Amino acid sequence: MKNLSITSLFILTLYILACTPKTTEKVVEVEPAPTPQKEENTITNPCTTLSDLSAAAREEAETAYVLYRDYIKSKEYKQAHTLWEKAYYAAPAANGRIKYQFDDGIKIYKNFYEETTDPVLKKTYHDSIMSIYDKRAECYPEPGYVEGRKAFDKYYYYPNESNPEETYDLFKQALDKKGKKADYFVINPMTAILADKLINEQISLDEGRKYITILLDAIEYGNANCGTKCNTWEIINNYAPARLENLEGIKGLYDCAYYEKKYLAVLAADPTNCEVINTAYSRLLWGGCDPANASVVQVKEAKETNCYTPPPPPGPLRLAFDAYNSGQYIEAIGLFEDFVNKTDDIEKKAKYTLLIAKIYYGDLKKFTKARKYALQAAELKANWGEPYMLIGKLYASSGPLCGPGTGWDSQIVTWAAIDKFEYAKKIDSSMSSEANKWIGKYKQYMPTKEDVFFRQLKAGDSFTVPCWIQERTTIRTAD
């Protein structure tokens, strides 16, 4: 009776207590334990299960499994650890179906890691976590899942114990094995690493293109099949697509098919908008589409029908605009600079210097360069608000560059952006309407009073916005 009582208690507790932690801003969850089947004796597993043990050993392991979870629930990790070890090392696969014992062990060692300052112990705890992941992969093979979890933990929690290249390779393995069905928690960190490597020319364009394609397919598939995780995919949507779009300024990274898919859809939604038409046309050519390509011909016809403007007379400006309209952005910048350097007309100097800033912003996605030329344009023409409006938009769109797309790091860029919009209308009343529109749009995205208080700051204090912005501003809240 005693054996039956303990066994029944174990099975009941084991089946009921499995739970899933809430999704954090880092976008990861532990999957719930599957509903067990009754035919326990038919379960096969490459790892030791409870049914492989003697009656006495099984009773001891079952008891340890039940008791350690109570300590986990009350966050008494030291007490949980001894019992967890007894259960885990006796029967790591438990009843051959459940997996949460691995997540519990990782939770225990993660707590130990965070509580100690001893670098030797930190490495030991990190290594223990990685070995638990390896054991899970052995007991419950699921190609790509464990690689993704290990990479995620190394990226967010244990960067000091990890080789960045190893982390990147684990993310690649996860994407290679799961493809468009990649786990959601892989998307944002892999996007960040991949973007940095491409910008710093640490990987080839072919490698970058391969994993961007998988990421974009995974985002599309994940949103279409989000089920109960649609809120999680919304966090991903606030970061990864914009971060990947910012890579369009790398010549040759995205091919013609990418630009066709993206910009023809935009054009279809607004087929007579000249800004949309001109952007689509130049992007297709920037992406290497043949001028005889049916898509290019279609957009060119729309451009000639809806957006014809007389070209400048033959000369440097004509050459610069021809280059730009043909998607030769880098060549166009050089030609506009030549014109600016040679003309004595201050108005034209200012106008085309700002146009260079806009090309760096909108087409090449090089924000520091765009700000540099916007400031140069502002110096050329007094009380001109448009360059500061552009800088404000640069800052406002930097959320995915300076943070995860949501939360504190992405919100604080709004302070610097609103400063620029306010300044633009202060010096140039013609900018008031547009500036007010942008201020109203981004005020709602400022941090809350709670966010500010949590960081031991207060509204009205001076604050330097980090990342590439590096602007001194004033703390404000949305509420």
Image: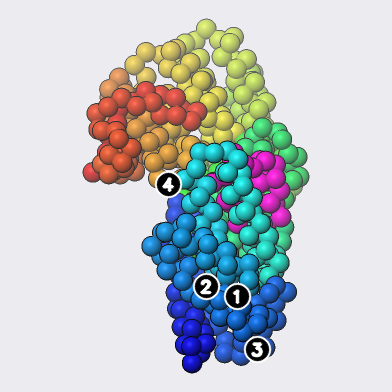
Residue 244 visible in the displayed image = no
* Extreme residue toward the top, this view: 344
Residue holding disc 2: 65
The relative height of residue 48 versus residue 220 in the rendered view (above or below) is below
Q: Quadrant of the C terminus?
A: top left
Residue interval drawn in magenta: 149-174
- Disc 3 crowd, CA 10 A, few/some/many (<14, 14-19, 20+): few
Residue holding disc 4: 406
The amino acid type, in three-letter code, at marker 4 is Thr
Residue holding disc 3: 41
Q: Secondary structure at mark 3?
A: helix
Q: Left or right? Give the position of 53 relative to 405.
A: right
Q: Nearer the viewer, mark 3 or mark 2?
A: 2
The relative height of residue 315 versus residue 262 in the rendered view (above or below) is above
Q: Secondary structure at mark 4?
A: loop
Residue shown at the point (61%, 90%) measured from the top left: 39
Residues under numbered marks 1 and 2 in contact, where contact means CB atoms less than 8 Å apart = yes
User: Which is more N-terminal, label 4 or label 3?
Assistant: 3
